[in-house]
Structure formats: C-alpha cells, structure tokens
Amino acid sequence: MIAELGHFALALALFVAVVQVVVPFWGAWKNNGQAMQIGAQAALAQFILVLVAFLALMNAYLTSDFSLANVFQNSHSQMPVLYKIAGVWGNHEGSMLLWILMLSFLGALVAIYGNNLPPTLKARVLSVQALIGVGFLGFLILSSNPFLRMDPVPADGTALNPLLQDPGLAFHPPFLYLGYVGMSVAFSFAVAALMEGRVDPAWARWVRPWTLLAWSSLTLGIAMGSWWAYYELGWGGYWFWDPVENASLMPWLAGTALLHSAIVVEKRDTLKVWTILMAIVAFSTSLLGTFVVRSGLLTSVHSFATDPTRGTILLGLCVLLTGGALALFAWRASSLKPGGTFQLLSRESALIGNNVLLTVILFFVMLGTFWPTIAELTSGRKVSIGPPFYNFWVIPLFTLLVVFMGMGIFLPWKRGKGGALWKRARLPLAASLLLSFAVYFITAPGQALAFLVGLIAFWMIFISLADGAERIKLFRVPLAESGRRFKSTPRSFWGGTLAHLGLGVAILGMAGTSLWAEQKVAVLMPGESLELAGFDLRFDGVRQAKVANYETEMGSFTLLKKGKIVGALVPERRWYPVAQMETVEAAILPRWGNDIYVAIGEPRGAGGQGRVVRAYHHPLIYYLWFGAILMTLGGILSLTDRRYRIGAPAGKNKKNVVPPSSEPVATTPEGAQA
Amino acid sequence: MRRFLISSIGLFFWALSLGAGLWLPSAVGQGARDVDLYLEDPAQEERARQISDQLRCVVCQSQSINGSNAFLARDMRNLVRERVAAGDSDEEIFAFFVDRYGEGVLMKPNAKGINKLLWSAPLILLLLGGGLAIMFVRQQATQPITPPAPLDDEEQDLLRAALEEEKGVEKTTITRSEPEPSKRVAKEQTGTHKAEKNSNTP
C-alpha cells in the first residue's frame, strides 16, 4: 500500500514537473507574475512528492517488503538497518530516485531562498530545473521503476552487494549525487541567463553559492569514495583512473573552473560567455558520468549492471539537455557584452590561465576515458588506458596550473607589475624549492618526480599561507590588529585559502603514497613475521566468528619495531552466504606520517594454518584525505560568506564589521580586493 | 620577514623529520612460498614491480597485475619476474605480453597509428586553448570600455532620492555633537537603501 503511494507520488511529481516547466516559462515570457509564482509552488510540491516516493521506498527496505522486485534484488531480512537504508541507493533504480530527490530538493531551495532574484530569472531557472526533472522522472518511471511488484512474493531477498555493505560507502553516494546534481542549478541559471540575454556581477553572485555547495559535496563524495576503495578493495590503491572515477572527476574539474571564472564575472564584469559555458559543461559532464555508470558502455569496477535500453534513453537525455543548452549558447552568447578590461599581467589573466588548464585536463581525462571505445570503433584495436598514461600528462599540466595559481593569488586585478609579483612570490618559492630539494636528497635520490611533485605541493601550501599572512599583516602589525584583520576579512577569502592549502596537503599525500610506498606479499604461518619498512609484522593466527549477516575470519597481527610492540592489526576476510561472495576488510594502523596496511588472503601451507598476507607501508597517505577535508571545509566556509548568503540582500558595499576604534573606512581597499 | 624566515626554517626541519620517516630500504621478500616468486636482487624485483604496474590484469577491470588478487595476475607477475631474471629489456617484455594477450594488456597505450592523436591531444589542446586565451586577453585589453546603459526614469528617481537622503544625513552629522556613532547609523541606513534598490532592479 505504502509502495503504491510512493509510485503514485512519483507519477504525480512528473505531472507537477511538467507544470513547472511550462507555466513559469510562459509567465516569464508574458511577464505574468501569477504564472511565475506557480513555478515556486510547483518546485516545492515536486520536492515533497519525490520525498514521499523516496520515503516509501525506504520504508519498503526497512520492512523488507520483498514483493517489490527492487527490494528483493538488493536487500535481505538479515542485513543491519544501516545497510537496509543504504540499500535504497545501492542499486540503479534507487540511486536514480536519490538523484531526482536531490534535483527537486535543490529546485525547492531555489524557490524558497530565491526571493532576491528578479522574478523572470527565478521563474526561468525553476522552469529549466524542472525540465531536467521531467526527463529523469520519465526515465525512472518508464525504464527503471523501483516500485514494480513481484508475484509470487519471494521468502527473502538476495542482499545488497557485500562490497557496498560498508559505512564509508553508505554515505558516499548522497554526497556524490548532491555534487553531481548541484551542478544542475548553475546549469539552470546559465540557461535562464541566456534566455534573459543578460549576465552581470549579481548573476555570478547568485550562482556562486550553488556551485560552492555542489563542489564541496563532490569533493567530499570523491574523497569518501577513494577512502572506501583504499580499505575495502584490499590492494592499497585509492585512485585507479577507472572510467567511473573519471566520471566524478570531470564535473569536479569543470566545477572548479566555474568557481574561479565566476569570481571574475562578479568582481570585474567580464568573462561572462566563458562562465556560462563552464556552467553548462559542469552539469553536462555530470550527465555524462550518469550515462557512463549506468549504460555499461565502459567497463568499470563500480558500474551498475544495466541493459542497453536505459543507456540509450540516458544518452538521449544527455544529448538533448547538453545539445539544447549549447545551441541556445551559440544563438545567444554574442549578446553578452564584457564590462571591465584588464592587462596581460593581471589576476584576470591568471584566472583565465587556470580555466584553460582545468579545461584541458578535463578534456584529456574525457578523451582517456572514452579512448578504448573510440579506438575500437575507428580502428578495431583493443587498447587500455591506465594510470601510466594519465600520470604522464597530468603531472606537467598540474605543474603549469599551480604556476597560474600563484599568479592568481599574488597579482592584483586589472594590471599587475612583474616586480611586485616577484617580491610576493619569492619567499614561498624559495621555501618550497628548499624543502623539495631536501625531500629529493633524503628520500629517493635520482627520482626527479619526487622533486617535482614535492615542489608543487609545497608551493601550494606556502603561497596559501603567505597570502593569508599578508592579508592579516601577520608580524607586521601587533597581533591584536592582525586578529581584527582576520575577523574582518571576508570568509570567502579564507575559504579559498583553505581550499588551496587543502589541495597542496592532498598532493603531498598522493606523492608520499605513490613514490615511497612499499608492498610485501608473503605466505605466513602462525608465529612467522615479515619485515616491512623497518617494522616486523608478526602473524599470530586466525579465528572465526559469525556476525550479523556474514561469517568472518579474523587474522591477528602484531606490529613490532625493534622488538617493541607498536600496535595490533586485525584484518578480516568475510563470507556473505546470501550473496555467495567474499570480501576483504583490510586492517589499517594509522600513524602520523604513514600507515601500515594489512590484508589477509586464502589459506596455504600444512593444515591450512598459513595465510597469504599482503602488507603495505604507505607514507603520508592520510594527508590525502585530510587535504580533501580541508578543501571541503574551505568550500563551506566560503559558502557562509555574508555576501553569498542565500537570501541576504545583495548590498555590494555594505560593511559587515566596523572596527570600534580608529578610522572606520580603513578596511575598504582590503575588502575590495577579496 | 625575519619571523617568516624563522618559521620556514622550522618547517624545513619538520619536513626533514618527515623525510626521515619516509626513508625506506627496499628489501627482498621473505617467507614467500607459492605466491609470488620474488627475485633475489632488489633492483631486479623493483624493475619487475614497475613493469607489473604497466600491465593490465586481463581478467580484471582497470587493474594492473600489481594491484590485483586474481590468480592470473599473480601468474603474470611471476612471468614478468622470469623475463626480468632472463635479462630481457623492458621493450622485449612488453612485446612478449602484447604477443600473448594483445595490445589491451598495456596500461600505457603505444603511440602508433590512431593512438598518436591520443598522446598528442593534451599538447594540442593546451596550445589551442592558450593561444585563444592570449588572443582574447590582448584584444579586450585594447578595447574601449563600453559605457553602462543609461539609467531609466525609475532608476533616476531612486538615485536622486538616495542622493538627497545622503545630503540630509551629512547635514545632521555636522549639527550633532557626537559625529562618529550617528554617522555610522546613517551609513548603514543608506547602505540598506542601496541594497533594496539593487534587489529591485538588478
């Protein structure tokens, strides 16, 4: 009964979405306020209906209602409650519903908080947002309906893929989807702006919080995914340049480019055409990712098993939305006139360089992802594109990118001077060169890559720190004054600085892991040990246990350094009887500068007492995820900036903080530079 | 400046200690029986590992034979070690695997035929994008700034009202005995007024 209610709500949501496409669009065209108002009401109604459908499906999972085919295929009565909930989006149909829930949620947010938008723009944004909704609701109901019943009702389900039964993965898709779908708002704003034929700094200010929200979620989602891959897949890697991973990286790259170019629109009223294009590209790559994961076109570790019909419909949606937006772009973009001009050596130019590079990396990743298909179609060759290819190009491109990053940070708007740039950049440059040389000589002499990657990471860290220190005039004025400056500096500045710092820290982690990792694979009998990076890892034996919905075999390991016990590790091998599948749970001993990672394999040797043991030493790996968390926090901090706060009046020169003592006007130049 | 120098020296030592933690002797595996047949010579083993990183496990998806638990991957790893021990060059080893498993076994595609396009694509894109960007920046730098559209009547009225109010405010601040706080209040008032205006006619 509840499932039918959900099914009905879904159909009704499609109907409401159609209304939301047509009525506000017509209203904006005829300048009919009432019709435009309907757009906001429809957006709220659509969200509530989709939410009802989603909760109905979740209820079916929680009550183990196996009369629903979707629940039967992806759940089991014995599964823990957490995974029953996660099971809702652990499959194609349910995750598509989550995708649509996010889409309608964002639409509702625009309806609620968009009161400071011009009515026609708001109506058009909601209309475009609903158009995407119509496409995907139609797709869900027609080809991937999660509410289809089964007759006769099976006694029990076939359980969620055990690999997905993991807390890291339970929360990874919601963030990832919020990131993917979040780009739809920027897309809708771009299309609406093209219809209106006008883009101005206010437009950029409205788009920015939505992009920040999407970007932060996407960053966190990707980081959680790689963390899951690291400890769950059992071979110590965190990023494999797999098509599905690339599918999440592409919108991230486009979103990063969009965030930076939108700053130029907001501050300098130029680069409008490009920013609109980036907004379209960001969501198009999200759509492309959705298509890649669900069509089975590319082989990947992560993709859902799917049939070609779905792929075809998704490709159609992808082409229609992207193609439509690009056609509108080609038709209307020339009507957007740039405002402020700037010289070759300026922050604007540096941000253009940043965007060019991010776009080149984006297309390069896209080309690599689709190349096996392209090569096979054009020349019948079966080729693989793996990490060695990506790493070959990504490192030089990234090196160039951080050069522009430094210029963007150290150059002023409009017109910069080479001398001033050098003066600001020389200290961070010297410090990062010094550190990279040190790392190069101490760790792996002769590894030029270690030097280069270290240089990139340290450079990013030092320019962020130097920029922050200069902003508050650290050590140049009394500390109390610096503290005041710290408080009065807009949060978007600190958000950006934190994100840059985070990326630097993350790259340090990547460098440490890829350049200096050590791996050992051996068969150990109880009592035997292996030597790894100066540690002795002793295998003490295994014990069996039956937990919840799986049986497990736990290996006991003791980590020793020079005979002294450092820690204990308990890697597991789990057997899920319902799914007839085995998973590996690696044990990880986190340490400040590195970690020890152990996974156990199949029995070997006399009496089956020995085990295949894979042990890894990963220096600096935590920096990777710590950096990602810093980036996410940076995004959120920037989101809370007064200027971008959703719904806040768009006063441009409004002063947030007036220092109680001394001249109140003194902060103006600082504020203008933000 | 000096403080900054001191702190960077501190960071330097911090990184030194970090680097010391990273220092790893590459050692030969011990206790291996029927899994991986490690090579005695650490240099050879390291070379075998690097080659294994570039070969795809043909029964897996997007995994190198170095990062896979599959039996076939292990056999392929041992095969690499065998070739390394036999003294084959990297090219010979890759050719050996391509002969056996086809071109798809290479994680790093060769630069022959249509793959030339793949390998040169980033450079082409970079030159193209960079060229267009420089052209754009040069062209707009010489362009005269297009003046903003003239205000319409409604906006003119709003502007006049705002200006008058500001004038009134200036007068009151002069006559008041405490100029500072009242000025601030007045500023805030005009600020909100402007904000309203902005949100009405963006």
Image (cartoon, rainbow, N blue to C red):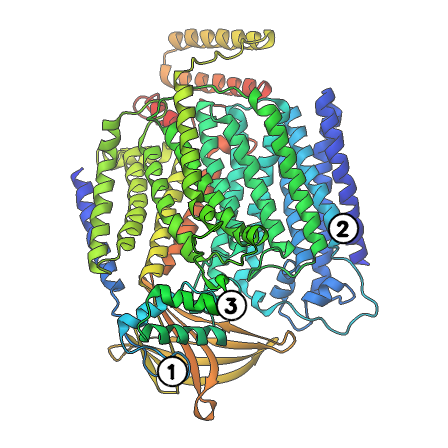
Sort mark 3 into few (<14), some (14-19) or many (20+) by Cα contacts within 10 Å. some
- Which residue occupies 35% across, 48% down? A504
Q: A602 or B56: nearer the eye?
A: B56
Is residue A492 something one can see in this rendering?
A: no
* Of callouts 2 and 1, the N-terminal one: 2
Q: Are marks 2 and 1 in contact (CB under 8 Å)?
A: no
Looking at the picture, which amino acid does disc 2 mark?
Answer: Ile
Sort mark 2 into few (<14), some (14-19) or many (20+) by Cα contacts within 10 Å. some
Q: Is residue A380 left or right of residue A20?
A: left
Tag 3 residue: B58
Q: A254 or B89: nearer the eye?
A: B89
In the image, residue A618 sits, relative to residue A465, either above or below, namely below
Disc 3 secondary structure class: loop
Q: Which of the 4 image quarters holds residue A150?
A: bottom right
Disc 2 secondary structure class: helix
Mark 3 and mark 2: Cα distance apart in space: 38 Å
Camera-near label (2 vs 1) is 2
